């Protein structure tokens, strides 16, 4: 009979440890990127190297983790200081919208969800529950977080660009210091690609805020958008090589584009689950003696 070592038992009882400092940087605890951008950006390649300003917009990758109580994520890259938007949609609970309607209670950012985003359709299997979007100039950053449908605006805040925004248990920070990642171009394959970029837009939510638990897989979709209704080719999950800007945001149907334009954040085992598993193995070992 094989014996279970004390080392193995220690691993079984060890609680996963992940404490993200929300500073716009993907720490090692995030693990591997869930998505790495392969296409050049048509919204400009930032060369400023400053945390507060950028002269281009790109999405180089996505890092995210559900640690059993919190969703933490970083959309790496840059966001130009001209009120372009990083837009992230979150599928975290039952229900949701596969196509964005024009009946949302949200009125923030000149009614952006009901106006410019209305009609946007996601891949099959992605049903958005929440929308998060951020835009800025060199001085001020504006962030919106809304529940789709009747939920309305949950956070609508302005704060100093480069600083940390805390709203309840949620935190957000934008770091534009990246000068690597994808280059500018017409949407062709980028060399180098987005691998290795660790700075960008970081956000953190308690799972309860998203109607989720530590057992739920959470999906994230998103893109760089103009200040109004023009979507770039910088899309979470990626577009086929050679794809240029997608134009009118509300007319985009990701279901008609090859591949998945979203990523899935699978939960890590909760400490209680690991403890139960360890006790079960101990009991099985005793029965076999």
Image (tube, grey):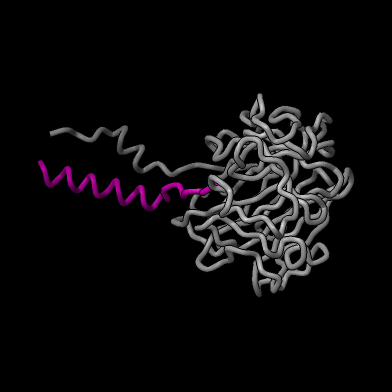
Expressed as whole percent of the image width and height from the top left, the position of residue 138 reads 88, 43
Nearer to us in this view, 1 or 84:
84
Up/down of 86 relative to 44, above or below: below
Expressed as whole percent of the image width and height from the top left, the position of residue 261 reads 58, 48
On whether residue 43 falls in the magenta region, the answer is: no
Query: Secondary structure of the magenta portion, mostly?
Result: helix
Q: Which quadrant would residue 77 be assigned to in this image?
A: top right
Residue at left offset 80%, top offset 50%: 226
Residue at left offset 73%, top offset 38%: 58
Nearer to us in this view, 102 or 150:
102
Residue at left offset 42%, top offset 50%: 270
Q: Which quadrant would residue 184 be assigned to in this image?
A: top right
Pick the quarter of the image with the N terminus: top left
Nearer to us in this view, 253 or 139:
253
Q: Which quadrant would residue 142 be assigned to in this image?
A: bottom right
Q: Which residues are magenta?
A: 263-289
Nearer to us in this view, 176 or 149:
149
């Amino acid at each position: 009979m094989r014996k279970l070592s004390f080392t193995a038992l220690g691993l079984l009882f060890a609680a996963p440890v992940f404490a993200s400092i929300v500073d716009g940087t993907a720490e090692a605890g995030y693990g591997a990127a869930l998505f790495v951008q392969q296409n050049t950006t048509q919204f400009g390649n930032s060369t400023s190297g400053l945390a507060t300003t950028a002269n281009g917009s790109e999405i180089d990758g996505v890092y995210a983790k559900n640690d059993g109580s919190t969703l933490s994520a970083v959309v790496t890259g840059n966001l130009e200081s001209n009120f372009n938007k990083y837009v992230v949609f979150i599928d975290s609970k039952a229900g949701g919208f596969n196509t964005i309607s024009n009946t949302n209670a949200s009125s923030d950012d000149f009614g952006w969800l009901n106006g410019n985003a209305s009609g946007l359709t996601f891949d099959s299997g992605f049903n958005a529950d929440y929308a998060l979007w951020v835009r800025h100039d060199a001085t001020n950053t504006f962030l919106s977080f809304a529940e789709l449908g009747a939920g309305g605006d949950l956070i609508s805040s302005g704060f100093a660009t480069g600083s940390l925004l805390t709203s309840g248990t949620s935190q957000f920070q934008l770091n534009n210091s990246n000068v690597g990642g994808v280059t500018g171009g017409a949407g062709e394959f980028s060399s180098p690609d987005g691998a290795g970029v660790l700075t960008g837009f970081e956000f953190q939510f308690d799972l309860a805020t998203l109607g989720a638990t530590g057992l739920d897989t959470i999906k994230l979709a998103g893109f760089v958008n103009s200040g109004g209704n023009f979507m770039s080719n910088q899309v979470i999950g990626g577009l086929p090589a050679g794809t240029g800007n997608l134009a009118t945001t509300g007319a985009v149907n990701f279901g008609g584009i090859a591949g998945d334009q979203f990523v899935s954040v699978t939960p890590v085992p909760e400490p209680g689950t690991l403890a139960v598993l360890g006790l079960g193995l101990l009991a099985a070992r005793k029965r076999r003696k």
